[in-house]
């Protein structure tokens, strides 16, 4: 009976999330080293302006370009991550609108696709759990991000741990100066769900430098709450997928006054 209730809770949680949140796409691409400079130039010269226009129109709430740092199969694995958050996934975005923004530029000179190969696409729902340290200036303090996909046996338990324990602990650590992390957030993986991609949730850690991103995130004198990690291993199914990226460019809505 307990197992049935857990399953029903997880289904209800997934349905609630699906009804309440927009959809984010993680699109992975492989760019040859000799094409990287031109590829990034096209993204930041043309597609960043396109994204700004789509955000202003309300089609997108987030757009970003991220370049992978390091790796284990650097000659073949994807090295670019494009993130789009759609307000309405069925409506999508006006991809052809870029020709109206740059009417005098040939599409072939703006397109990043001729310089890259799409390798994977993941769909997620954000949980509106983004937190950041006090007095953060994103353009100065968000320079590197670690994206982590979590392989869980019980995703509801994992999300509860992050919401009820990890998030408040991290907020306090930021307030007390016990962490070099500048921000954090999480989301639920919608698709795919397969043996090749066994991850059910995702999170991100933000840093102001590569040195910080490669260093221990918490100071040695941080006192962890009693029983903080109790039960954690019970809902972890396997190793996480964790990779570090340089934040090349990001577009978000302009805060209203």
Image: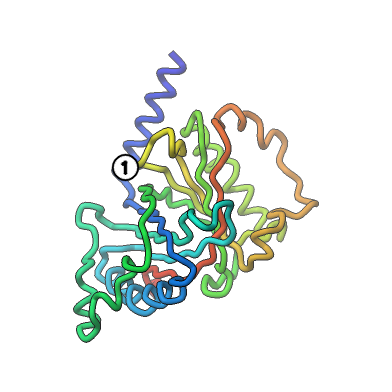
Residue located 58% across and 38% down the image = 239
Quadrant housing residue 183: bottom right
Q: Is residue 114 above or below residue 153?
A: below
Q: Is residue 121 visible?
A: yes
Residue 170: x, y in percent? 62, 51
Residue 76: x, y in percent? 48, 55
Residue 40: x, y in percent? 43, 73
| 235 displayed left or right of 228 | left
Task: Please identify the quadrant where the C terminus is shown.
Answer: bottom left
Label 1 Cα crowd, 10 Å radius (few <14 / some 14-19 / many 20+)? some
Q: Label 1, secondary structure: give it.
A: helix
Q: Is residue 91 above or below residue 99?
A: above
Residue indicated by mark 1: 18
Q: Which residue is the extreme one toward the top?
A: 1
Q: Is residue 162 above or below residue 234?
A: below
Q: Which residue is the extreme one toward the bottom?
A: 104
Residue located 51% across and 67% down the image = 247
| 38 displayed left or right of 59 | right
Residue located 33% across and 73% down the image = 47
Quadrant housing residue 171: bottom right
Residue 80: x, y in percent? 45, 61
Task: Please identify the quadrant where the N terminus is shown.
Answer: top left
Residue located 53% across and 48% down the image = 148
């Amino acid at each position: 009976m307990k197992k049935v209730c857990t399953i029903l809770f997880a289904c209800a949680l997934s349905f609630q999330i699906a009804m309440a949140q927009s959809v984010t796409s993680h699109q992975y691409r492989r760019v040859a080293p000799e094409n990287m400079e031109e590829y990034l130039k096209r993204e930041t010269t043309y597609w960043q302006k396109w994204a700004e226009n789509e955000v202003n129109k309300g089609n997108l709430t987030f757009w970003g370009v991220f370049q992978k740092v390091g790796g284990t199969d650097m000659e073949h694995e994807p090295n670019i991550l494009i993130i789009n958050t759609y307000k309405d996934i069925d409506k999508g975005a006006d991809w052809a609108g870029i020709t109206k923004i740059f009417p005098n530029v040939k599409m072939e000179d703006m397109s990043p696709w001729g310089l890259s190969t799409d390798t994977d696409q993941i769909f997620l729902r954000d949980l509106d759990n983004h937190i950041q340290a006090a007095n953060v200036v994103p353009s100065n303090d968000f320079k590197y991000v670690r994206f982590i996909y979590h392989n869980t046996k019980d995703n509801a338990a994992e999300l509860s741990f992050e919401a009820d324990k990890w998030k408040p602990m991290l907020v306090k650590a930021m307030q007390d100066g016990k962490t070099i992390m500048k921000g954090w957030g999480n989301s639920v993986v919608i698709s795919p769900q397969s043996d090749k991609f066994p991850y059910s949730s995702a999170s991100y850690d933000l840093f102001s430098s590569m040195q910080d991103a490669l260093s221990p995130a918490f100071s040695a004198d941080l006192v962890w709450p009693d029983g903080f990690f109790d039960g954690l291993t019970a809902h972890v199914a396997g190793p996480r997928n964790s990779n570090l990226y340089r934040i090349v460019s990001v577009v978000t809505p302009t805060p209203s006054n």
